[in-house]
Image (spheres, rainbow, N blue to C red):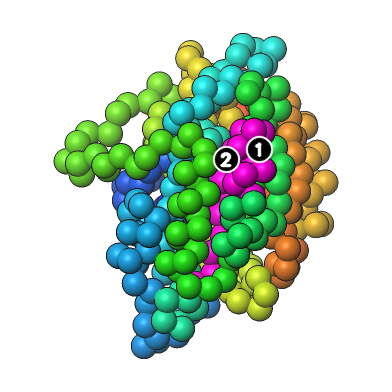
Amino acid sequence: MRILRSIPPIPLASGVVTTVFGALFVAVTIGCQSARSTTTPPSAARTAPGSPAPDWKAVDAAMGRPGVAQPGDVQRYNFPRGDLHVVVSDQSGDVTLRPTMALGGWIAMHGTGAGNSVMAMGDIVLTESELPAVMSRLQQGGVEQTAVHHHVMRETPRVLYMHVSAHGDAVKIAETVRSAIALTNAPATTPAPSSSAAAPGIDLDTSSVATALGYTGRTNGGVYQVSTPRPETIRERGMVVPGSMGLGTAMNFQPTGGGRAAITGDFVLLATEVNPVIRALRGAGIEVTSLHNHMLNDEPRLFFMHFWAIGDAVVLARGLRSALDSTAQRAR
């Protein structure tokens, strides 16, 4: 549900909480993935020096919305499902999901160095009734599926997440994606707010949450989003995949009042990390809602574990930190 994913996380110095200001982009996530971002070593992520970059203006026109530049020479297009009113039932109280919490579809593109050729990956948020037609239209245009699954539980209406992959001409891929999105009720893009406009506040002690996590994030659409990168270089079909194409652990906090929050997101894990993270999350009272892959030919093989809980935001952040400590992480 990534949701974010975006701005690389900034490690916290001892006892110091750092504030992040970054480029605004239309809401995402993880699905959660909405807000996901990581950074791959620049020498590995970028196209070869002197190679022509894709014509992003032409891609923007074909996609029908502006892209947002991401680390690693990635262009990202967001499709938030602001049209959906999704309620998650929980014994602590029902929660209406914000688009930036778990309803942010996206497509990211990275140039291969051969003119307008790109590798593309993404996560499209769909209702059950929308899924068949969207899948068929994407297949007709050469955009393939790598996973279809849920991210949260006990939600109404049911929401599914379709992960996609494509290689080829960026404009043709964008035209295919745009025509597929047109088969849904996803709203058209809206102009980005002025950079001079003050960001709306959030009813959450984000400084304490960041301290508990050991990473700081940013507020986006009423949700506090934090992303942490993996240290490995990830390849798909032999090509390096920049981390900003959905390869960072995403943790989203939606305030529910009184210092409490609903949390969701997904951990990006190696096989050996899966069960230690499950034990850490369950020990902290955090539900594991889904475990699956997002890619077909990734090296090393990655697993994506989605989670959910409602409670004191700082206590939950400590639980997430214990799970993070069970994974390989970049030095903070």
Q: Which residues are magenta?
A: 118-135
The residue where tag 1 is placed is: 160
**Helix, strand or loop for disc 1:** strand
Q: Residues within 10 Å of mark 1 (few under 14, many from 20)?
A: many
Query: To which quarter of the image does residue 300 belong?
Result: bottom right
Asked if the magenta segment contains residue 119, the reply would be yes
Camera-side residue of 306 and 160: 160
Q: Residue at x 39, y 32 (%)?
A: 221
Camera-side residue of 266 and 188: 188
Q: Residue at x 67, y 75 (%)?
A: 237
Residue 127, relative to residue 216: is it above or below? above
What is the CA distance from the residue labelled 2 to the residue labelled 1? Answer: 6 Å
Q: Does residue 119 appear left or right of residue 237 in this picture?
A: left
Residue 208 horizontal/vertical position (percent): 47, 31
The tag on residue 49 is: none
What amino acid is found at the position of numbered circle 1 in the picture? Leu
What amino acid is found at the position of numbered circle 2 in the picture? Val
Asked if the magenta segment contains residue 311, the reply would be no
**Sequence-wise first label, 2 or 1:** 2
Q: Residue furthest left?
A: 196
Q: Residue at x 52, y 49 (%)?
A: 180
Query: In this view of the protein, can residue 296 be seen by the observer?
Result: yes
Residue 197 horizontal/vertical position (percent): 19, 36
Q: Does residue 31 appear left or right of residue 22 in this picture?
A: right
Query: To which quarter of the image does residue 88 belong?
Result: top right
The tag on residue 125 is: 2
